[in-house]
């Protein structure tokens, strides 16, 4: 353990309560006197409409990367940007930061914001939102919901997370502190899952206010946070007649009989034309007689008198309970006496 680490208070290996508040120590050239042994490089393509902007700002990109001993190349013919380490590069992780910088530049992030990724406490995240949705119309609506009217939803996300957020095409590019990047990713993923970003924005605002109160610092905050409840509570309608699955058999089903086979089996195939006609007429007459019988029964129902109630039931209804009647009379007399007195 070096003296500088002891001074910074990083001697203990136990978990830290608020790890986000720890200051990351700077990696200086003295920490790596032998430099890097092998060259590393990354390249990324950029769209045609970014060519003019990159051409104008490329000297600034080279200047910012030269400070970290990183070489940057712009190929306008191929439409690519390349970053390489040199013999003077001392930080092994700066090439990853440089790669993230050129990726952000290709995703239409302005140079003033993209150059911030070279700092130790700043990271970047490119969230691909096109793969989260299959329906194009829903995708466009939910992406617009993330931006909000006149970009106010996106601006509120930036203020609460301290991150720069850019919605471009099928991706969302975020740049800022690592804790803020986690919050931005969660908001974007929830929005594409049809959860409105206002729920997460409200939760972040409440958390910020609760963090200021020392009494509520170590308590559970779930009771204060808004809870999202889906409005789509209707269950899928089940069919009335469910088909039961038959047990699996490796053999194919038997071949169905044709009309000719059925006629041969019933014997109708060998009948003459007159016999077939007579059989059809007989079946038709039988059906007609049966329908006529049902029709007559329906008509006759109108002339059937309704059943009268029996005398016993009438007598039972007409009977009086003498005990209850006496009690009612007594109560009536008592009320009259009370009013007279």
Image (spheres, rainbow, N blue to C red):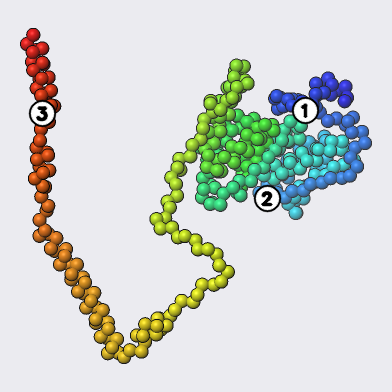
Residue farthest along the left direction in this orientation: 340
The spot of residue 69 in percent (x, y) is 85, 37
Q: Which mark is residue 106?
A: none
Crowd rating for badge 2 (residues with CA inside 10 Å; few <14, some 14–19, many 20+): few
Residue at 31% of width from left, 91% of height from top?
A: 272
Residue 74 % position (x, y)? 77, 47
- Residue for point 54% across, 47% down: 139
Q: Earlier in the sequence, mark 1 or mark 2?
A: 1
Query: Which residue position holds label 3?
Result: 322
Residue 231 occupies which quadrant of the picture? top left
**Farthest top residue?**
341
Label 1, secondary structure: give it.
Answer: loop
**Image quadrant in which the N terminus is located:** top right
Quadrant that contains the C terminus:
top left
In the depicted structure, whether residue 153 falls above or below residue 325: below
Crowd band around label 1 with a 10 angstrom C-alpha radius: few (<14), some (14–19), many (20+): few
Residue pictured at 6% horizontal, 11% vertical? 340
- Sooner in the amino-acid sequence: mark 3 or mark 2: 2
Mark whose residue sits in front, 1 or 3: 3
Q: Secondary structure at mark 2?
A: loop
Q: Which residue is mark 1?
A: 24
Q: Which residue is mark 2?
A: 47
Give the x, y percent position of residue 153. 54, 35
């Amino acid at each position: 353990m070096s003296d500088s680490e002891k001074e910074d208070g990083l001697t203990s290996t136990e978990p830290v309560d608020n790890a986000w508040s720890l200051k990351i120590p700077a990696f200086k050239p003295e920490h790596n006197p032998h430099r890097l042994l092998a060259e590393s490089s990354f390249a990324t393509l950029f769209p045609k409409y970014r060519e003019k902007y990159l051409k104008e700002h490329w000297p600034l990109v080279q200047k910012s990367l030269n400070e970290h001993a990183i070489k940057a190349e712009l190929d306008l013919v191929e439409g690519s940007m390349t970053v390489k380490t040199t013999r003077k590069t001392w930080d092994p992780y700066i090439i990853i930061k440089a790669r993230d910088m050129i990726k952000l530049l290709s995703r239409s992030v302005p140079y003033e914001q993209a150059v911030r990724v070279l700092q130790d406490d700043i990271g970047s995240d490119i969230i691909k939102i096109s793969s989260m949705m299959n329906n194009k119309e829903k995708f466009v609506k939910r992406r617009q919901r993330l931006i909000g009217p006149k970009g106010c939803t996106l601006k509120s996300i930036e203020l609460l997370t301290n991150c720069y957020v850019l919605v471009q095409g099928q991706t969302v590019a975020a740049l800022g502190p690592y804790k803020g990047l986690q919050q931005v990713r969660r908001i974007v993923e929830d929005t594409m899952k049809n959860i409105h970003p206002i729920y997460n924005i409200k939760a972040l605002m409440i958390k910020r206010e609760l963090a200021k109160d020392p009494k509520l610092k170590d308590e559970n905050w779930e009771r204060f946070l808004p809870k999202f409840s889906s409005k789509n509570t209707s269950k899928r309608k089940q069919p009335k007649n469910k088909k039961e699955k038959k047990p699996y058999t490796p053999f194919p089903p038997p071949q169905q009989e044709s009309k000719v086979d059925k006629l041969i089996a019933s014997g109708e195939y060998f009948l003459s034309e007159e016999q077939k006609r007579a059989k059809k007429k007989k079946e038709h007459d039988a059906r007609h007689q049966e329908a006529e019988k049902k029709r007559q029964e329906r008509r006759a129902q109108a002339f059937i008198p309704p059943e009268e109630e029996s005398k016993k039931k009438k007598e039972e209804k007409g009977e009086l309970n003498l005990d209850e009647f006496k009690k009612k009379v007594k109560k009536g007399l008592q009320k009259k006496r009370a009013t007279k007195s």
